[in-house]
Amino acid sequence: MINTFSTLPFLPGLWRGAAEAPALYDSPTGWIDFSGLAQTVLEAKNALSSPQKNLVFWLAEARNDSVAGYLSALQAGHTVAVLDPKQRQLAELIATYQPHCIIAPDIAVPAGYRQT
């Protein structure tokens, strides 16, 4: 197994080397271990990579894929605004700030953005 923990330097040293230790749990998907989380973050980080730092809106839900999206945006060096996906002013915030990327599991893709 490849050690991908170097891509997650913010993990406490105590978890380094414990790739199979549980990292996150959500009821739809169950447990994800640190190795799986690191791999998911690395893949998403590569998709978010760009030459400059960008604003990323993360529509937060307490789910494994949502947390991985947040961590990947941070790892890619972007500024992340954590927002409630049910926020009434969401469309106004998107129009005002025009984020480079919106990480939003299970919601409609806003106009002007493409789903990846």
Image (cartoon, rainbow, N blue to C red):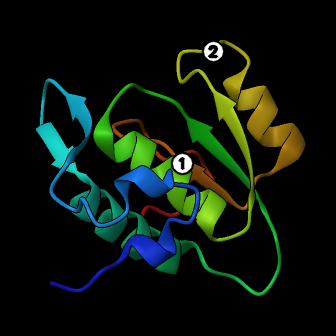
x then y, percent, for residue 27 = 14, 23
106 in relation to 68, above or below = above
x then y, percent, for residue 46 = 49, 80
Q: Residues within 10 Å of mark 1 (few under 14, many from 20)?
A: many
* 14 left or right, relative to 27: right
x then y, percent, for residue 48 = 57, 72
Q: Amino acid at mark 2?
A: Gln
Q: Write the residue at 33% across / 46% down.
A: 65
Q: Amino acid at mark 1?
A: Tyr
Q: Write the residue at 49% across / 74% down.
A: 7
* 97 left or right, relative to 1: right
**Residue 39 sits in quarter:** bottom left
Q: Nearer the viewer, residue 13 or 7?
A: 13
Quarter placement of the C terminus = bottom left
Q: Nearer the viewer, residue 72 or 54?
A: 72
**Circle on res. 70:** 1
Viewer-nearest of labels 2 and 1? 1
x then y, percent, for residue 35 = 24, 64
Q: Write the residue at 72% across / 62% down.
A: 100
Using the rendered image of the protein, determine whether residue 95 is visible from the camera's viewpoint: yes
* 81 left or right, relative to 14: right
Q: Which residue is mark 2?
A: 87
**Residue 42 sits in quarter:** bottom left
Q: Residues within 10 Å of mark 2 (few under 14, many from 20)?
A: few
Task: State the separation of the CA atoms marked 2 and 1.
Answer: 18 Å
